[in-house]
Image: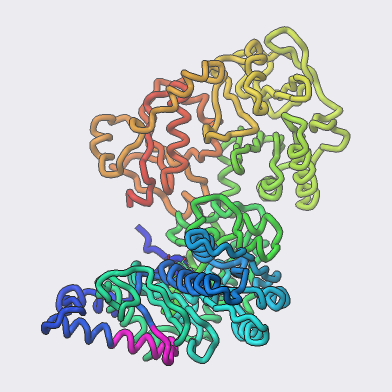
Amino acid sequence: MQAEIYLDANATSAALPAALAAAAAALSDCYGNPSSTHGAGIRARAMLDAVRARARRVLGAGAGQVVFNSGATEGIQTAVLSALWALRSRQAAGEAAGSLLVYGATEHKAVPESLAHWNALLGTGLELRALPVDENGLHRLDVLRDLAPRAALVCTMAANNETGVVSDLAGIEAVLRDCAGGALWMVDSVQALGKLPLALAATRIDYAPFSGHKLYAPKGVGMLYVREGAPFTPLMAGGGQEAGLRAGTENMSGIAALGAVLGAIEQGGVLRGHDELARYREQLADALRAALPGIVFNAPFEGTLPTTLNFSVPGFASKELLDLFDAAGVRISSGSACSSAKAAPSYVLEAMALPAWRSSAALRMSFGPAADAAFIDAACMRIAHCGQALRAGHLLALEAGDGVLQLWSEGACSWLLLDRASRAGIVIDPLPELAARIAALLRSQNFGVAAVLATGASPGVAAGRAALLEELTEAGVPHRCAGSDAMGWPACHDQVLLGDGASAGALTHGTQVLARLRDGHANSYLLGRAKAGSMAADAARFVFCGADRESVRRLAALAGPETIVCRAVDPFNEVCSTMHADLQSLEKRQAAAGIDAEIDLDPGALSDFFATHPDALLVDVREPCERAVDMAPAWEGRDVLGVPLSRLSEQLAHWLRGEQRPIVFFCRSGNRSVRAARCLHRLGYRNAWHLAGGLALAA
Ligand code: PLP
């Protein structure tokens, strides 16, 4: 098992050894309740006071308050509640109060969500207004100048969690100082702690929330700075802890750990300074440039935290690179941690008006300020390893054999038909967002393109074809697409007789033919072997068609029950189907889909499973480049067969014809393997399981 290289410090961090020791001491020795008046309580109170005094020094809190709480989300709620409650009182007294709640367009979601929540709950009825940022992620001060006189509360973060862009707080302060309104000001300072100098009392900032776990303290502890004289309303009432500002017995182990981290900031030596961190960033950036040709960094290094790199790579979805890095034991994230489970583009990069592909393909690599040269060297070696695998990965994907390759994007599919002997590919339904990837894949292996075909005539399909043709030309991939019709069918083609005796246009593709079937504005394509100019129904191996399920019924006479059905859409993650399964009634298909409980294999139950299924086959559905950086464990000496999910359709026909040997699919997280196992079940192959939670839990 390779050591983990954790490069997701903006999401969270492991505790510093000193923080661990302090937490353990607080749990075992200094375990008293700081509100108790006996000796144990007094000792706990002394520790609490010492950490608060240290926090005040590190934050430059002056006469302001530092309130310990559960983290930044709580700090943000408290600040927003305090500001809005004060405003509500002014509204009730008929005094002038601002009408806008202004927040930076790139704020963490906790900010606009809290503003909307408390504004609705308190009935303050203010208007939420996003403050735009420029292409470098900096707040538009000209817009702020316009809004500030009407603002009741302004929220602008100190540094952005996705891009590391450091806000121009001095510029914002100057605007707020110059304008007539008396807006309160919250600065989410989560990403600044330990990375930027802080002197809060010397600024006009009213509220500054912090979170411990972003800087080597545990989750569930944080602090809120409140300027002297700024309105304050406790979020929680109760036993009067934290001088009545935040009720609830203090999280003493968390506070002790946070105290150790604050000590590291104060004393120096453990956390590195800006210049050293900037050198580390440069080293990582060089490694990334070498591994990922064409990489673009999404925020200028100048003016960003040196610990954050945000980048996109043309032709790669963020999920693909995330999977590859994860297989190599390098933990990075796509967009922000909270949204990385979703495929949504980054709203932060969208606010910076970056091209759509960069916002949706963005990855974030972030390290903590305690990183050292050995760690960065190890990370760079791992990145180089990923780069090598990526280059070889293209090779493996194509060398896995002639045949059919499936690529997905947001519930839609593109299909590549590859013939290695003639180095020719046919592309069906290329999606615009996959165009660069497909062109790069074909170029890397010196494939030419015989046709770029569509199954439908929608504008999206036409855009995908146009985008791919442009990318092919740019990448220097030879293609024979000139003179083809609107669906991409070449003017020059052969004819083949199909199972119903009718003749259809056909393209020769290696030892097979691809026949075209017209159906109104839609096209379907049959791929199979022809004998003496005829393709019998049972010789049709694949049919490629659009979303319309009825079209398959019309193909029933031309294809066999085991012909694999490859659609332009896959909204339910079904991968692909067979004619037989597609012709079944909807109810039967739903019944077949309700099989989750039976197909999940717990990693701990694997040995027992193998004991009862001695002939079981282990199938790794990760992409070849992921396998190249991390050969999966050979459980109990078993061979592992690599069948990437993108190649499942090719392999299916073989398995469906066989004797249904038990198969256990696995991947990184269980997301791809569950799709493979479900697909087999849906098609009548009952002996398929998958490793729930994937390699991440099995390790
Ligand atoms: N603000 C910023 C800038 C953050 O990065 C985060 C965490 O991702 C938060 C607020 C919320 O912090 P927590 O979830 O620890 O409360």
Q: What secondary structure characterizes most of the magenta part?
A: helix
Q: Front-most of 107 and 136? A: 107
Answer with the quarter of the image where residue 399 lies.
Answer: top right
The answer to whether residue 511 of the structure is visible from this angle is: yes
In the picture as drawn, the residue positioned furthest to the left comes out as 38
In the figure, is residue 628 to the left or right of 495?
Answer: left
Relative vertical location of residue 339 with respect to residue 374 in this rendering, above or below: above
Residue 607: x percent and y percent? 25, 39
Residue 546: x percent and y percent? 67, 28
In the picture as drawn, the residue positioned furthest to the right comes out as 483
Bounds of the magenta span?
50-65
Answer with the quarter of the image where residue 617 lies.
Answer: top left
Q: Front-most of 221 and 538? A: 221
In the figure, is residue 499 to the left or right of 669?
Answer: right
In the picture as drawn, the residue positioned furthest to the top comes out as 501
Residue beneath the point at 47% across and 36% down = 675
In this figure, what is the number of numbered marks? Answer: 0
The answer to whether residue 307 of the structure is visible from this angle is: no
- Is 55 within the magenta? yes
Relative vertical location of residue 64 with respect to residue 319 in this rendering, above or below: below
Residue beneath the point at 34% across and 45% down = 634
Relative vertical location of residue 375 with respect to residue 350 in this rendering, above or below: below
Residue beneath the point at 38% across and 28% down = 595
Residue 389: x percent and y percent? 53, 55
- Is 418 within the magenta? no
